[in-house]
Amino acid sequence: MSVPDDSERTSPPSDEEQRDPHDSMVVLECAIPASDVALETLLGTFPDVVVETERLVPTNHSPLPYLWTDDRCGQEFYEALVAEPSVDRAWRVATFSEGALYRLEWREDRVRLLEWLADSHESLALLEASATDGEWTMKFRFPDRSALGDFRSFYRSNDIDVRIHRLYDLTQPKLGQYNVTEKQREALIRALEMGHFDIPREATQADVGEALGITAKSVSERLRRGQTNLINNSLTVGQPTGIGLDEKVDRKHM
């Protein structure tokens, strides 16, 4: 089967296709007040409750369509959610012993940031978002520095208070999704490949360390921190964590 050349295109290339392959994707982790995102009243009423977005790509580009919560407040929490000024409709999709899953439809006149996220779905990915005690913690992935600059221009022009936690280039697949550093990822994958996690174990930490050129103690530390990040950022409802992350914030681009 032949592959059509550019002269056979019926539509213009997407932003992703036009992107310079040498440009690095950029990951931004930041904190934003609930007053600039959503659910300010709810989070003020239930300051100890944590809400977290469901990790999916909505087909209708609706921002934050599903929320997990660790609440134990039941009907009282649900009624407060429905009463939120930015929420048009809300459903409790499922209830569990440790919380619930809600589906949301946002009002047309929702908070400006939610509207911008819906309009900008092709130029960024919202990897994570969770909120508690009046503040959202969010992780964005941008295709390049130019898209990051667009976000910077947006929040500055709208007087949105964005407090940067981390900003870094995404150099490895999946690296920015679970707050695992490059060294932690390398240790985890090498340990997996060598059978360190098998039963019975086929490789000790010393074996893995020898393959990586580091000590067994360093292997133990990287595996512990990497596993902690994977668990906290994939299996729990709450604030994303980054154990052992020491990348400096590149403020010249923000």
Image: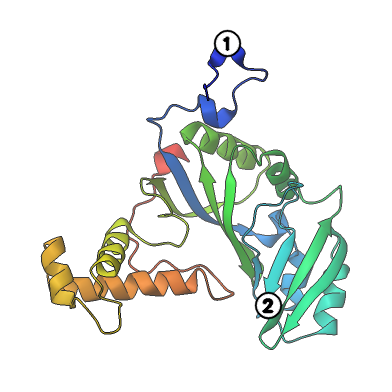
Counting from the top left corner in percent of width and height, residue 237 is at 59, 75
Amino acid type shown at disc 2? Pro
74 is higher (above) or lower (below) than 226: below
Up-down relation of residue 213 to residue 201 (above or below)? above
Task: Residue 163 in the image: state x and y as whole percent.
Answer: 53, 54
Question: Residue at position x 50%, y 68% from top?
Answer: 233
Q: Is residue 222 visible?
A: yes
Name the residue: 30% across, 67% down.
188
Which residue is disc 1 drawn over?
7
Q: In this view of the protein, which residue sits in the foreground, 222 or 35?
A: 222
Instruction: Please name whichever residue, 32 or 67, is drawn nearer the observer in this view of the structure.
Output: 67
Residue designated by label 2: 47
Q: Identify the image's colour scheme: rainbow, by chain, secondary structure or one colour.
A: rainbow
Front in this rendered view, residue 151 or 220 = 220
Mark 1 / mark 2, whichever is N-terminal: 1
Dot 1 amino acid type? Ser
Point out residue 219 in the picture as x, y percentages from the top left corner: 21, 71
